Image (cartoon, rainbow, N blue to C red):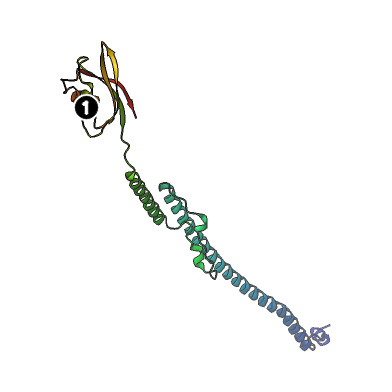
Amino acid sequence: MSAVQCLAEENIWFEKPHYDEAERRFYEGANGPCTHSQSSSASGDQDLVARVKSLELENQGMQKVVEDLRAALLKLESRVQVLERSPAAPVPCANSVKVENGGGDEEDDDIDLFGSDEEEDAEAEKLKEERIAAYAAKKSKKPALIAKSSILLDVKPWDDETDMAKLEECVRSVVADGLLWGQSKLVPVGYGIKKLQIGCVVEDDKVGTDLLEEEITKFEDYVQSVDVAAFNKI
């Protein structure tokens, strides 16, 4: 069979429009799903970009919160160090700390839990000074305690002819600031001689036994000697 006869019997060329239509539908079908996939991919990329941006914004917000907390912690640590270095002082009552809840503003996060330490120290020091001054004033009003002693003297005459009444008069004539004469009596010594035993109260800072003996022995016409019979602190 010749080539012309084979070509004449072949019908592919006569049905080419059908093949073209089938080829067109094939490629349209193939391109259709491909176009949908590309659209879906583009939409997915947009969603991914949006989520990344959202995460970035959220991350920035978290970083700001962390920085605020870090600043608050540093501030609290510095105040604790100041309190540890400062001398002991009256601890403020926990009820004195006032926390006002307004409308949930951010200023509530900066509440001063420790108050003003300098003002409290100044008030405590002022109160201490006032108490010391009051105590000193009260103490100054109290009368000073005066030390006193009770002394019993034995005044001996020269002989039994000495006027004992005159002798006692001479003894009582001794006057000094802080000296108060008391009771007296005559005590027999022997051979008709009697001695004058007389008591007195003296202020220790003003009158002593040496002064009394010196003043009494000046009456040498009546007094032979003066002895301290008893000496007691009052």
Question: Would residue 142 appear left or right of 14 to someone viewing this image?
Answer: left
SS class of the residue under badge 1? helix
Q: Position of residue 172 (x, y in %)?
A: 23, 28
Q: Is residue 98 above or below residue 217?
A: below
Location of the C terminus by quadrant is top left
Badge 1: residue crowd in 10 Å (few <14, some 14–19, many ≥20)? few
Name which quarter of the figure residue 12 lies in: bottom right
For the point 43% across and 49% down, which residue is it?
89
Name which quarter of the figure residue 169 lies in: top left
Q: Position of residue 149 (x, y in %)?
A: 31, 29
For the point 43% across and 50% down, which residue is it?
83
Q: Residue furthest top?
A: 191
At label 1, the amino acid type is Glu
Q: Is residue 8 above or below residue 38?
A: below
Q: Position of residue 126 (x, y in %)?
A: 36, 53
Q: Nearer the viewer, residue 70 or 152?
A: 152
For the point 68% across and 79% down, which residue is it?
35
Q: Which residue is mark 1?
A: 169
